[in-house]
Amino acid sequence: MQQTDPQPAPKDYENSLGISLLRNLVADQKAIWTSPEHLRAADADWLLPLGGATAALFVTDTETEKHLSNSPGRLKYSKDFSNYGLASLVAAGGGMYLWGHMTHDEHKRETGFLAGEAALDSLAVTYATKYSFGRERPLQDNYRGSFWQGGDSFPSEHSSAAWAVASVVAHEYPGPLTNILAYGLATAVSGSRLSAKQHFPSDVLIGSAIGWFVGQEVYRHHHDPELGGGDWETYTESRDDEARRLWGSGGSPYVELDSWIYPAFDRLIALGVIDSGFSGMRPWTRRECARLLGEAEEKIDEESGNRSEAEEIYDALAAEFHDETEQTDPGSSTRAKVESLYSRVTGISGKPLTDGYDFGQTMVNDFGRPYQEGLNSVDGVSGWASSGRWIAYARAEYERAPSAPALPETARQTIASVGGIPAVAPATPFSSVNRVELLDAYVGLNVENWQITFGRQSLWWGPGDGGPMMFGDDAEPIDMFRINRVSPFQLPSFLKLLGPIRTEFFIGQLEGQHFFDTSSGVVGSWTRAPSPQPLIDGWKVSFKLTTNLEVGVSYTTMFGGVGVPTTPGTFVQAILDSGGDLPDGDSKSSREDGLDFSYRIPKLRKWLTFYGDGFAHDQIIFFLDPKERPLPFGYPERAAWHAGIYVPMFPKLRRLDFRAEGVYTNNPLGPRGGYDNGFYYDENRYLNGYTNNGNLLGSWVGRAGQGIQAWTNYWLGARSRLQVNFRHQNVGHDYIPGGGSLTDVGGRVDYWWRSLGLSTSVQHERWLFPVIQPNVSRNVTVAAEVSFEPKKLFGRSPANSAESALRDGKK
C-alpha cells in the first residue's frame, strides 16, 4: 500500500542561545528518534545499500584493522589529526557564529549556530547508540570487535560530529569549493579514526551516516531560506514522481538469460547509445528493457541518410517491448502471455565431458541440463501473467538424455582425492533422464521499483559471455527469495558521485551436496544427498561511476546443512563471519566475494569495451594495507580472474563483432602463497564445493584451470546471425594426475522470420584427461532448435484500451 508523505514539521527560525537552543534540541531529538515511522518504500533505495555496506564491513572489520600499520608514530599522528580536524570544524562553526553576530550577518550567524546544534544532536544520538551496543574497540581483544561487552566503539563520535557540521556548512553555502573543503575534512577525520585504530570501518560508516542525517534534520527544520543557502530535499522528495509512477509501480517478468535481447542490448551499450544499462547484473525485467529503449531513442540519429546498426537493433527491440512502452498505467493493468515454445535436439557423437567441477564440460552455461553421448532433447514452454504490482512466471521443459557408463575408477578416485572425500563413488552407470523440469518459475511483487520474488530463479553476476566467476547459469536455477532493485537509482547530495546504482539480495536452497565436514568427521553418501541441504545467500551492488565505467561488488555465503542447524542465528553468523568455528577448525560457513567492472574506452567508445571479473574466498580482494600499497587497489592477485574485450563493430564491416575472454583459477602465487591447485570453488565444509546439483555456480573453467574463448558474429539482422566460436581449457598437472586439456571449435546460425526462429550449431571437441582415458578423445555435437514466440497478449488496462480505441477510430 502506498503511504502518504507525513505533514512537514513546523519551521523554527528562532536560532539563538539559551532557552531557544534547548527547545530546538528537544524538538530535534524527538524528530530524530521518531523518523523511522516516516520512512517510505522509496527509502529502500538508500537503506538497503547502507545496510548491505554495513554488513560487508562487519564481515571485514577485523581483517581490515589487522592489516593497518601498528607503528606508534602513525597511531599517534592519526589520533592527533582526528582530534585537531574535528576541533577545526567545530571552531569554524563557532567562528562563523561570532563573526556573524559581530557583523550582523544573519546567514553566517545561522550557519555557526546550526552547525553547533547539529554537532550536539549527533553526539546525543551517537552516545546513546554506543552504550546500547557496547562494542569493543579494535585494540581490545585482538580486533574481535565484540558487541555488548561494555565498549564504546560503535559508532564513531568523531565521524558523526564532523559530518553533522560539514553537512550544514555545505548546504548553507552550496558550491564545489565549500563541498570539497567541508566534506573533505570530514572524510579525513573519519579516515584518521581508522588509521589510529580507534574505530572499525563499520563504526566510521554509521557514525558518518548519523552525522549527515542529523545535519539534514537540523537544517530542514531550522534554516531560514530567506537568508540564502541551498535546498535540502529528502530522497523521496527528490524523486521524479512521473518516472516513479510509470516505471516503478507495475510488476514485470524477468527476461530469460538465454534470450536474444541481451546480445542486442550489449551492442547498443557498447555503441554508446545506452549509458544506464548494467551489464554485470542480469536478468532484467521487461519494464527495465523498455526504460532502456526510451534512453536509446533519444540518442539514435541518422547516419548520412542511411539506417545505422543501432537503429536496426532499436527497431527490433522496440517491437519486442511495444506493450511495455505503450503502457500508461502499469499499476492497474492485467496481462498474460505465452512467451515462447521451443524444441531442441542435440546429437553427440563421441564421449563428452560432463563434470566441469572436477574436469571439464562439453556444453556450458546451459542451466545444468543433462546430456550424454547420443540423442538429447529439450521441449519447453514459457509464459507469464501480471496484474498491477503482481507477477507470475513459469518456464517448464521436458528433458531427455541417454544413459552412459560410469567414469573409470581412476577418475572416481581422483574426484575423491581432490575433494577430500573419504569414499570413492561406486561404479554406477549414469541413468537415462526423462523428466519434466522447471527452470525459472516464480511469483513476485513490485514495490517502488523493488521487485520481491520467490521461486526458482537464475542469476548472472558479471560482464561478458563466457560465464561469471561468482554466479551464472551453468548450474540449475535455485529456489530462492530475492529482492532486486530493477531500475537504477541515485543517492542524494554528494553521494550522486557514485552514479546510478543497482543492487539485489537473495537467499536460496542448494541441492546435490553429498558430503559435509562436521565436528564428528565427514558424513554423507554418494548414493543419496543427506538432509538438510545447505543454503546460499548473496548480495550485489553495482555503480555506474561514469557513463563509460561500471563497477560491481558481490558477496555470497554458503551456510547450514548437515552438522550446523539452519537458523536465523547461523544465517547472521555466516554473513558476519562470527559465532566461532567447528572443533576441527573449519568454519561453520563459507564466504566468497567478487569484484567486476566494464569500461568503454572513451576515444574508442563505439569500437572497444574492456571488462574484468574477479572471485576470491573470504573477502581477500578488499583487504587494504596502506603500508604496502595505496588505496583502492587492495590485493587483486589473491583472486581468480576473468577478463575480456568486446568490439561491437568494425569500421568497414559494421555487421561484424568480436569478443575474446581469458580466465584462470590456478593462481600464479601457487602453494607458496596459500593457493594450492583446486583452491577456488573448493569448500572445506561442503566437500562437493561451490555447486548446485554437481554443476558449478561460477565459471566453466573449474577449480584449477586456464581458459580462453573467442566469438565473432556476422549479424544478418538484430537477432539473426552467423557465428564462429573457439574455446580452450587447460587443467593443472598438480591438481589431477596428468592434468587435462579441452579444445572446441564450432559455428552457429540463428535465423528469425517474424515469430519463428531456427538455430543450428555444430561443435568439434578434442579433449585429453588421462585419469578418464589415456588417449585423446574427440566428439562432435550437432544441435537444432525451433522456437515460436506468439505475439498475442491477453488482457489490457482500461487506459490502454481507450487509447487503442482512439487509434482505431482514427484509422
Image (cartoon, helix red, strand yellow):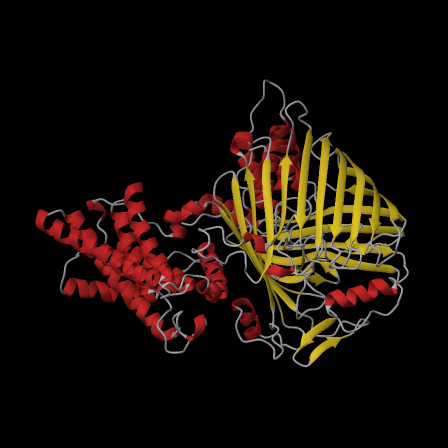
Tell me where residue 241 appears, x and y as whole percent: 44, 46
Q: How many marks?
A: 0
- As drawn, 350 above or below 519: above
Tell me where residue 305 appears, x and y as whole percent: 60, 18
- As drawn, 439 above or below 561: above
| Quarter of the image where one finds residue 756 | top right
Name the side, left or right, on which 209 lies relative to 568.
left
Tell me where residue 658 appears, x and y as whole percent: 68, 34
Q: Nearer the viewer, residue 473 or 303?
A: 473
Asked whether residue 146 is in view, the answer is no
- As drawn, 703 above or below 601: below
| Quarter of the image where one finds residue 161 | bottom left
Residue depicted at x 69% and y 59%: 677
Tell me where residue 671 appears, x and y as whole percent: 64, 60
Name the side, left or right, on which 675 lies relative to 753.
left
Asked whether residue 166 is in view, the answer is yes
Q: Nearer the viewer, residue 610 or 476?
A: 610
